[in-house]
Amino acid sequence: MKVCGKVHKYGDNVDTDVIIPARYLNTADHKELAAHCMEDIDTEFVKNVKDGDIMVAEQNFGCGSSREHAPISIKASGISCVIASTFARIFYRNAINIGLPIMECDEAAKDIDKGDEVEIDFDTGVITNKTKGHTYQAQPFPEFIKEIINAGGLLNSLK
Amino acid sequence: MGMTMTQKILAAHAGLEKVEAGQLIKCKLDMVLGNDVTTPVAINEFEKAGFTKVFDNTKISMVMDHFTPNKDIKSAAHTLQCRTFAGQYDIKHYYDVGDMGIEHALLPEKGIVASGECIIGADSHTCTYGALGAFSTGVGSTDMCAGMATGEAWFKVPSAIKFNLTGKLNEYVMGKDVILHIIGMIGVDGALYKSMEFMGEGLASLSMDDRLSMANMAIEAGAKNGIFAVDDITREYQKGRVDREYNVYEADEDAVYEAVYDIDLSQIKPTVSFPHLPENTKTPDNWGEVAIQQVVIGSCTNGRLEDMEMAAKILEGKHIANGVRCIVIPATQQVYLECCKRGYMETFINAGCAVSTPTCGPCLGGHMGILAKGERAVATTNRNFVGRMGHPESEVYLASPAVAAASAVTGKISQPSEIM
């Protein structure tokens, strides 16, 4: 399976408080959460994001609170995949559990710029930057995690 | 090759003789925790997946602490959803307004978690219980849901960083200063995916409240968990609280650590994390003149009795500075009651503090002390991210209760020795 979209780019240590501020955690509604995604560091994100777009950040993406509302708000905003140099561990778990595709690839995270058009092949882990003409190879997932992803999330994998 | 404390607990709960770093395993859980923000998402998933029973109604805790007493109609709907579910499934450890406390202060206080146990919680600060020598880690709502239904969770066995503690803390220096110092040293991703294992002769001078505040902030270094070696202080703390057998796991002599740090507690100075990352730590020489408008003393990091005792000792007979709001939040009903009995409450009120019923409230910018644009707070909480306590252009400075109370008196970031 492949996805392709324009990139929204961020730096190191993007925490879950800026992905979805706690003042909006009085709802669990996916669309309401998506309406405030990233607003404390990027007020333009919600206005510009289109279905299939890709989010790219550098070290320790999703650090801080365990709120699953963070990957939910990213997924519900239309983002098809998050690429980062590294992910904070609870965010990593949550993204896999809810079926938000993520890729760990330091080379891609550093080279890709805001607005680049990027294609991701989930089967091979190859990331293609169509704007720059570069390709990068993401870290493959362990088999156990692939099974959760292929089942469509943790709860489906338990059935 | 030997195992660390964390690896031993995980192996025991996976039914394995031995595990090693990187291995993926499935563990039996002794406790599954959620709060009023994360539990509703877990309940939605539980119902959507068609589960009809919980694995064990005595091994699930639900604590209504984040936006309670209900801050608005939507929050009220969330606690109602939790209350209804807890009633339907007869959840034994359901705590609501009047008997609740901040989850990570409440569970150890009530003996709901103990040494050697394997605990997950849909709250990142679930790592707090490592202070008791438990394996305890934060997860999301879907993991909580799966845990409630099956009593199991999958883990990647973490590698470890060892902190060998020696010496003794100086007066007005607390466990909070130690953990801020460590986060400043290794960074907010310095322990990413790893366990932080605390041991050494210096443990003897760290109270359980110090240890709980240190383990609490392991997540702020990216760690999977923080864990303390069990000693007489741990055993004494659990006496009269934990009414079941618990297991003590010691690290093997030949356990493998990715790094070992020697920390001399006597060298730790009052430490403050400047905005907007917990790793931006500074000691008094580098604080400069930072005027503040608010002080918060409380949270799952520092709302326990010794934290209140320290704040009361510093505020006794003094008054907070003009233009500063000081909000004190004992973390549990028991701590609150003890503050009343010991006269701390009178000290706080005479000093001009507002005292609140237990709530996470301002720590995460929920309610009970939100900052306006441009305002600065010194807080005994755990995160100083952009917008954490309110407006995206407000600032949070993380500190111990001693520094927070002293700062409330002077109106700027100050160490206790300036006023004592």
Image: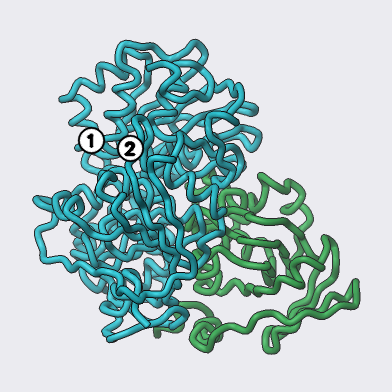
Chain colours: A green, B cyan
The answer to whether marks 2 and 1 sit on the same chain is yes
Using the image, tell me which numbered label, if any, was put on residue B335.
1
Q: Chain of mark 1?
A: B
Using the image, tell me which numbered label, if any, was put on residue B303.
2
B83 left or right of A129 in image: left
Q: Position of residue A106 (x, y in %)?
A: 71, 71
Using the image, tell me which numbered label, if any, was put on residue B414.
none
B326 left or right of A75 in image: left
**Quarter of image, res B255:** bottom left
Q: Amino acid at mark 2?
A: Gly
Q: Is residue B51 visible?
A: no
Nearer-the-camera pick, B180 or B291 = B180
B42 left or right of B372 in image: left
Q: Position of residue B95 (x, y in %)?
A: 24, 49
Determine crowd level at label 2: few under 14, some 14-19, many 20+ residues with C-alpha closer than 10 A: many
Q: Residue at x 41, y 56 (%)?
A: B123
Residue B400 position (above or below residue B353): below
Tell me the element at label 1.
helix
Nearer-the-camera pick, B149 or B181 = B181
